[in-house]
Amino acid sequence: MDMTPLAPSKLALVPFVSVANMMRLVNAIGPEQVMRDLAAYIEEDFRRWPDFDKTPRVASHSAEGVIELMPTADAENYGFKYVNGHPTNGRTGHQTVTAFGVLSSVATGYPLLMTEMTLLTALRTAATSALVGKYLAPKGATVMGMIGNGAQCEFQALAFRAICGIDTLRLYDIDPAATEKAAKNLTAQGFTVTKCRSAEEAVEGAQVITTCTADKQYATILTDNMVGAGVHINAIGGDCPGKTELHRDILTRSEIFVEYPPQTRIEGEIQALDADHPVTELWKVMRGEAEGRRDAKQITLFDSVGFAIEDFSALRYVHDRVQQGEYAQMLDLLADPDDPRDLFGMLTRAG
Amino acid sequence: MDMTPLAPSKLALVPFVSVANMMRLVNAIGPEQVMRDLAAYIEEDFRRWPDFDKTPRVASHSAEGVIELMPTADAENYGFKYVNGHPTNGRTGHQTVTAFGVLSSVATGYPLLMTEMTLLTALRTAATSALVGKYLAPKGATVMGMIGNGAQCEFQALAFRAICGIDTLRLYDIDPAATEKAAKNLTAQGFTVTKCRSAEEAVEGAQVITTCTADKQYATILTDNMVGAGVHINAIGGDCPGKTELHRDILTRSEIFVEYPPQTRIEGEIQALDADHPVTELWKVMRGEAEGRRDAKQITLFDSVGFAIEDFSALRYVHDRVQQGEYAQMLDLLADPDDPRDLFGMLTRAG
């Protein structure tokens, strides 16, 4: 393993934020503040939605899971994320979801930043949910039921506290060890936490219900009788073709809000509905061009699948924070011959 | 700039091949041998073409150029390349084409290798051309005309010598400085080189014609009268919508061979033809399921645009070569908590 390559030129180098440095950055700012900041960046980008070059993510499915590329671009920057989803990875000590990403200059095509995005995805996913909650959750909501207490759970809770004022959590997971883990972490963060023995118990008295499970299959985490009037449902887990969490009857009773319809129709809860079932695009709500929550009785549903613009916003945020050079190593990623046409000469001179 | 992050666990680390290490690797093996090896890997993968999950690359176009993601997968591995093409980058000292890529495990979604691919793309593009030349160039060909003497030129020449026996080159570029650069490099490599003052002069007596220019527009590099019977045309440069190099009349006189029709129809020389104009897929030629060159009079044309499987083969090759740990740094790319569900706990414990 060689750690001291030849000194490359400045154009060759791309700042790289490792997992260790991302943890340092997030801990220095504080996770709740990072998610507040991320929500502001995401909101800013959602409000200029038409500026983006958009495409559904490019997914490669296998029996074990999925690997996806999520690109988007505005006039100035191009961003993409590599992300996997492998529900049974935990059995071998691997993460269900890992990710990394790159922000580039549209003008030159050169990467400006490469960063770990496993942590960043957890943060941006929760920031997006809470940002949407700001528009859709009932006024004065303080209690959130959380079904699925895996890696995303604590981030959701902190984001909903930072942005929506949630301070009380009702946790349920099919695996009690996951609930124990989340309860311990979240009690230490100052939440009032109830560990529940069923999904039914977890949603009792909750104004917001977050579903966040990882099975790659149709699973009915919430049934119709569990969802009362006025609730906001934050459905995170259904994000693959063939993977949903909610009973169809909940969908037909809800006002459904989505990120990018061409992707959500394929991957989201609304797979279960007709292709022309009405949904509201969140960027329009954030621009004031569509209505969010209309009244206290309405059931609102954020059918979250995660869209490339959220990663773009997160990449922009990290890029803005590491420009001083702290938190980044410089990677010798790009060949940079003195004469751009003389790539071969660079190679032979190095030999 | 922090170069000494916390020690991450083994699952967090991904081997990274920098530009400097790629140059060390290629110089240690020798560029011609690397391209012979790459051609063998590419041929092996083309011969099992139906095993791959294939999609046209995902391109983001701007006025200045294009940024593309090129994914593919077999049952075991997933690979993708990030690559840009910015024809005017040279004006600011940037490369027209830069690239990097990742090879991953389909079973876990975890990256196994991250590598620079600017050099690797130059090598695999030339290796592919020469591999195709092995099937299509006229027997006993020794003279190649090369129009466009930029960064790809020398790699093409060396690959065609290593695989097809080309030893004599006729070089032409609209910029005489590019021809000077290529002539100097290739004379030093033992080729017989003629610097030509026009494209017409460059193709005189050539059995193989390589066109490799970078303009992002329709440009007629070769006109019909320049192409005699029996020639093999290796058309590298036309690889964007709106970017071609050959006059349409050459196409209609030629037997056209392509990598992946759904992508070549959009990006290649055959943009100029009807969508159902017959083309031959190279993987079928390599499997013996389609004919290559039929006779000495035929004009054969490789309408090269570059396909993801070639990058997959190149990633496989590099992965096989760096497994011992030499030529790679270990990147702390993947968050790896002790309990995969306790991503938040890992973050707070680091703080």
Image (cartoon, coloured by chain):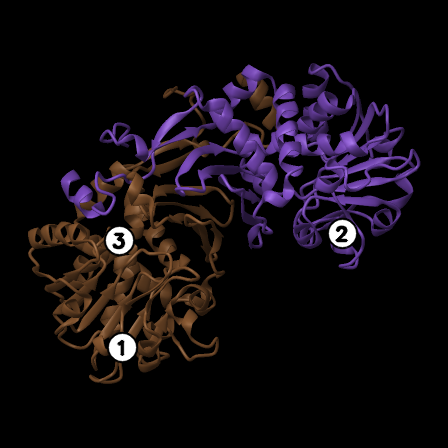
Chain colours: A brown, B purple
> Is residue B180 shown to the viewer in this render?
no
Amino acid of disc 3: Leu
Query: Could you tell me which secondary element the residue under label 2 belongs to?
Result: helix
In the rendering, at what x and y percent does residue B143 appear? Answer: 83, 25
Q: Earlier in the sequence, mark 1 or mark 3?
A: 3
Marks 3 and 2 sit apart, C-alpha to C-alpha, by: 46 Å
The residue singled out by tag 1 in the image is: A224
Q: Is residue A4 above or below residue B242?
A: above
Give the quarter of the figure containing the N terminus of chain B. top left
Is A322 in front, or is B284? B284
- Which mark's residue is nearer the viewer, 1 or 3? 1
Badge 2 and badge 1 in a common chain = no
Amino acid of disc 1: Asp
Is B311 in front, or is A8? B311
> Is residue A246 shown to the viewer in this render?
yes
Amino acid of disc 2: Ile
In this rendering, position of residue A143 left or right of residue B328: left
